[in-house]
Structure formats: C-alpha cells, structure tokens
Amino acid sequence: MVAVIGDGALTGGMAWEALNNIAEGPLNRHGDRRLVMIVNDNGRSYMPTVGGLANHLTTLRTSPHYEQVLDVVKRRLNGVRGVGPAVYDALHAMKKGMKDVLAPQGLFEDLGLKYVGPVDGHDRVAVEHALAGAKRFGGPVIVHVITQKGFGYDPAERNEADQFHQIGPFDAETGEGTPKGRIWTDFFTDEIVAIGEERQDIVAITAAMLYPVGLDRFAARFPERTFDVGIAEQHAVTSAAGMAMGGLHPVVAIYATFMNRAFDQVLMDVALHRCGVTFVIDRAGVTGDDGASHNGMWDMSIFQVVPGIRLAAPRDGARVRELLREAVAVEDAPTVVRLPKGAPPVHDIDAIGKVGDADLLVRRGDKDVLIVAAGSMVGPCVEVATRLTDQGIGVTLVDPRWVKPIEPALVPLAAEHRLIVTVEDNGKVGGFGSNLLHLLADEGVSRPFRLHGIPQEFLGHAKRDAILEQIGLTAQALARRIVEDVTALDAGHSLVDID
Ligand SMILES: Cc1ncc(C[n+]2csc(CCOP(=O)(O)OP(=O)(O)O)c2C)c(N)n1
C-alpha cells in the first residue's frame, strides 16, 4: 500500500489519527505491515505551511544526512588503532541519540514508523532509490520527499498567494491572470478590516486558506489577531470557542464544504456553550468546476439543526457588509454568514419595505405568489417577479436575510398568498425552504408550497452557471415552473409534477 500526503494535509487531525493507528495495524499474510507513506513536502499548503509539524519537517529537510556523517566518523575512528572500534561501537549504541542531534526524526520513530529522507523529489533516480528501499522494508515507512510548488515555471515559483496552486486562465508568457471583477469575498475583506479597526476583540481564524477566504488584508493589518491553524477545520472551530470564552469574538472563515467536517465542533463546542463566534463560509451553494466535493450545498441543512445558531445569506454586496456587522454583534450564540462563489449583482438590490426583519423587494398585483428567496437566488428572483408580472400573475418577493431563525412575520404573509415558493442555493432536503414549510405546518397554514433548490445529489463537474441551468435555478426556468404551477392551480388542480 502506498499513500501520498502533502505537508499541508499532514497538519489535519485525521492524518495523525491514522499514524497512531498504523503502529497497531494488523499484519499481512507475510507477517509484516507494508505501508509506504510519501510525504510530498513543498513547505506549503496555499501559503507556507505553519505550525510545529511544519517546523519539524523543515528541521528534517535542512539537517545534514546523518548516515553520511556517521560514515565519516566511523572511517576516521576505525583508523585510530586500538581505540577506534570501541569508540565507534559506543557511538553506534548512541545512534538513535545521534540521529536526533543530526536529523531529529524522533517524532516519526516514536510512532513506530521508519523514516527515509529527505529525498529530492525532483531527482527521479533518488526518488526511485528511496521508494525501492521503502518497498523492501517490512513495516510502515515514511518517505520524506522535498519538492517545490510551481517547480520550473518562474511566475508560479514567485507567486506569493499560492504559487499557482489554483490558477485560472493566464498568459503563459507573463504569468498574468485575466483580471477579475469584485467577488463576494472582496466585500467581506473590506468590511472585516473596517470592523477590526473598530473592535480590538475581533480575531480571525483560517484553516490554511488566508487568501481564498479573503483574510489576507486583515492579516496584514492585524497579524497578532490572525491565526492560521493549518488544514484543521475542527480545531479552527473549537479553538474559536475557547477564544470566545476568553472574551474575544472570533471570525472563522472557511469554505462552506469544509465546514461540514467541523459540524460537531459547531454543535457541541460553540453552540452548546453559546459562544459568540461568527463563521463566514465562502463558496456556499453551487461552485461547479471543482466537482462534487467542493459544492457548498449542505450548510443551510446541517446548521438548521443547531440550536441557537443564526444563519445569514446576503443577496448583494451591501448585504454582506450589513449582515456581517449584525453577525459580529451577536455575543451569545454562533452566527453564520454564507457567501456564494463568484460576483454579487452589479447593482445592490434595494428593499421597498420590511416584513418583520426580512426585506420586502417586490409587491405587485394580486397576492398570487409569494417568493421567498435566499442569498444568491434573490437576484434571479427579481427577474422571475418581472416575468410573472408580464404574465399577469401577482407576486410578492421577500428576502429573509437571516434564513435561520425564520422570520415569524412570514407566516401571516404566506397565509395571504395562493402559492408559496422558496428558492435557495442549497440542497433541498432540510434547508431553508423545508424549514419554512415546517413552520407553516406548525402554525396551521396550509397552502400550495413549492420548494426550489439543489437536488440532493452529488453534482458533476461544470461551470457554476451551467449547473444552475441544469438544475433549473435560473430566472427563466424558475419563472416557467411557477407559471405552470399557477396555471394548474387556476384550473383547480394541485401543483404540477416536476419529477
Ligand atoms: C478539508 C479541506 N480543507 C481545505 C482544503 C483546501 N485545500 C486544497 S489543497 C490545500 C493545500 C494542500 O497542501 P498540501 O497538502 O501540502 O498539498 P500540495 O498541494 O502543497 O501538494 C488546501 C488548503 C481542502 N481541500 N480540504
């Protein structure tokens, strides 16, 4: 068995759980435990890998080859007649001690793992030699391979943010990427720096993704208030609970899909103790081209079950700023602000009124359809509302802003309409729409209800827009389905079957 892991990934708790377990693992039929673990150590996650383990790897990487040193010592001592061999034997007995002085690898050896390295990962012969040796060894072996991220391409090697770890289209001559407009993350970046200036208790936590989650400028301005915990989302969340108990207000910025693995920490370490921690979860909803593992389509469902947590879904840049401020003002419960991938609407979508704490965006004609849309789905729903009006269908469009807890004023509003439609960029099961449906049922409001969201499937790779089109979360598709439903209701039928 050969496993490959990066030095960044090795900072995660699961890697250490596995290393601990390997020492006690079962033997194969030859009575040995063959496992080669290649640590591809380029010193970086996106940014340089930080922490005690990273320091340890650096020590290993930069120490002299102790075997060579021992050889030299042996040759010299053996040359001294009478004394040499005895001294060498004593020295040999101290070999483990010597190893630790010359190449401190106690960490791996103490876990019962043979350490081979460091090996130059760009030297094919050296790597083959090390792997062949590791294969022959009957027990678990760590082969420590040193590589350079972006190797061989100057603009990548010099790139500070991530050495082209995740690069879009760029000019191969210059290494320059195509300029991008302002994305959701940029609005967070601006506002968290501003809030940091006003409040000394605000600290920021990232799990090895300082730039992608938009904490780079906060870190530059307040380095002592920024913590990179490595690729360790669970620890990021629980350490935030500790900091909150110590009087700070942590802002934990993590990609939505990576929050999943810290669910229990949010539930039992933060929410149970009513810690004022704000989670800014980026790339929420459909992200597309990174495939099924990266779609942030679970958060609105998994956080629904967490008592006390409050979840905001901004619809535009202005709402990112507004909701972030409301979130960090909450000191007795966790708050979540979910940011989609890509760019917010070019123009902010202003409210024309309020429904409790929710924003009323459109109120036209009869009370035929109430659309309650969350976050990035609000923009398309403004267009849906126009299309419905064009068809003579009366429409009310509301953005709850906070999708959890649900605004109670939505209940009487729903009761006034013939059809209730929810639209969210989240899995349909257990999300915001389903929570509103529950609430209406509890309150005895029974109305035709249509829930639009992401089908509960692992989505394939494609651009975000292409996937939204595939799953019917575009203005055109939504408008068509709502018109079909209204037509069915007009004819005295129930809602149309969309499967
Ligand atoms: C649980 C989780 N957190 C964060 C990420 C985002 N991420 C993708 S690659 C990466 C850096 C990986 O570094 P390393 O393991 O050293 O591999 P390298 O790309 O440097 O070879 C990070 C943080 C992820 N994929 N999964």
Image (cartoon, rainbow, N blue to C red):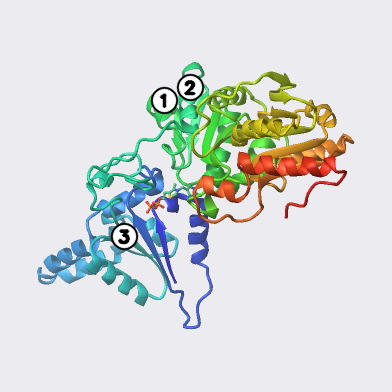
- Position in image of residue 79 (x %, y %): 10, 70
Mark 2 falls on what kind of element? Answer: helix
Q: Nearer the viewer, mark 2 or mark 3?
A: 2
Q: Is residue 454 left or right of residue 228?
A: right
Please tell me the numbered disc located at residue 145. 3
Q: How many marks?
A: 3
Give the residue displayed 13% in from the left and 71% down from the top: 82
Give the residue type at disc 3: Val
Residue at image mark 1: 222
Give the residue displayed 48% in from the left and 22% down from the top: 196
Give the residue displayed 47% in from the left and 38% down from the top: 206
Mark 1 falls on what kind of element? Answer: loop
Mark 1 touching mark 3, by CB under 8 A?
A: no
Mark 2 touching mark 3, by CB under 8 A?
A: no
Callout 1: few (<14), some (14-19), or many (20+) C-alpha neighbours within 10 Å? Answer: some
Callout 3: few (<14), some (14-19), or many (20+) C-alpha neighbours within 10 Å? Answer: many
Give whichever of discs 2 and 1 has the lower sequence position. 2
Disc 1 Cβ-to-ligand 1 distance below 8 Å: no
Q: Is residue 180 left or right of residue 281?
A: left
